[in-house]
Image: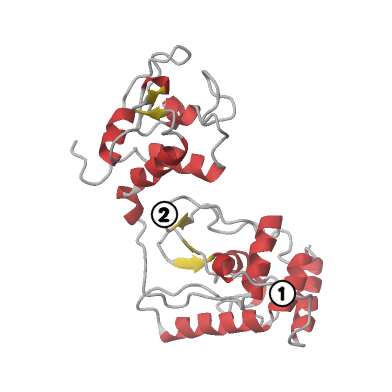
Amino acid sequence: MLGNLSRNLAILAIAVLGVGCGPDLGQCDMAHAVRVIYDAQGMPYHEGQAMVHESCGGGNFCHSAAQAGKSRLGAPAGLDFDVRTQPPGASPLDVQRTQAGAARVGEWARAIWGQVEADLMPPQGAGRTPRARGGWQSAQCLRQELPAIETPEGKRKLRNWLACGAPTLITPTLIVPPVSCQGAGFAAVNAILQSRCSQCHGSAMTSGMFDLEGDDCTAYRKLVGAVSTSLSCATRILLVPGDPAASLLVDKLQPSPDCGVRMPLGGALPQDQIDTIADWVQAGALAPPGCPP
């Protein structure tokens, strides 16, 4: 394993000696390249930047200037891809490290893409399980999975990010604290429900004997602790704070619900939206700001 790892890293080291070596990166879609997601500490990253940070070193292994010897797992000294977003008050050394890493990734973009496209990097066991995958969220407070860099989706995002010059957030001025999404949790959940469920579960048509009509506070009160009176799911509680398994709302979004058919009828929600709703319930189904107890 270590021999293959060292061989692959040596190939990459040789490739990057010639700037511009490697396959063509194709067209750049800048709108997608600069999409922002936030880590568990609220630090913003572009998606491609986040994947490189998680899979290529993250300050902890392989291509990190902070590591030496065995912790680099064979990565040659100087072959560093540190693209961590630096928090306010970061030391000049840390800022310079990210600046240098971003410049190096941009310079060696085609060689990096060639290795990833050929499934030579990241090697098995080193970077193929991003350290913080699953702890990311979008600007709308929706949980967002970070695709593994070697998957088709991960490769697509990486290639486009590299093709656009590997834009990197180094010392951003806008930081979103993790707690900022707690109060907005139901607003994000209700936005999903309103967009896909309100046509049937509105005041004009109350399928399942409940409706989502009204503002966030009104919709919240109609869900939490309410009992379904539908024939197929009679007596089931719509939403039990802290218990997704006992919540009919979450159950009905699954492929094989305990009662009735899967919702919504027009087609299943994307998994990230189902996760957002389930995670909000698991966290206690906090009420929207300004909603009196």
Whether residue 151 is visible here, answered yes or no, is no
**Quadrant of res 249:** top left
Question: Residue lying farthest front?
Answer: 204
Number of labels in the image equals 2
The residue at 41%/34% (across/down) is 198
**Quadrant of res 120:** bottom right
128 vs 163: above or below: above
Number of residues whose C-alpha sits closer than 10 Å to that of mark 1, classed few (under 14), some (14–19) or many (20 or more): many
Q: Are marks 1 and 2 in contact (CB under 8 Å)?
A: no
Question: Residue lying farthest left?
Answer: 292
**Quadrant of res 33:** bottom right
202 vs 101: above or below: above
* Nearer the observer, 140 or 121: 140
Mark 1 vs 2, N-terminal side: 1
The residue at 55%/22% (across/down) is 261
Residue under numbered circle 2: 140
* Nearer the observer, 73 or 207: 207
Looking at the rendered structure, the kind of residue marked 2 is Gln
For the N terminus, give its image quadrant: bottom right
The residue at 61%/78% (across/down) is 165
Looking at the rendered structure, the kind of residue marked 1 is Ile
* Percent of width and height locating residue 65: 58, 80
* Percent of width and height locating residue 184: 33, 49
Q: Which mark is residue 112?
A: 1
107 vs 141: above or below: below
Number of residues whose C-alpha sits closer than 10 Å to that of mark 2, classed few (under 14), some (14–19) or many (20 or more): few
Left or right, 19 with respect to 140, comes to right
SS at mark 2 in the image: loop
Whether residue 57 is visible here, answered yes or no, is yes
221 vs 260: above or below: below
Cα–Cα gap, marks 1 and 2: 31 Å
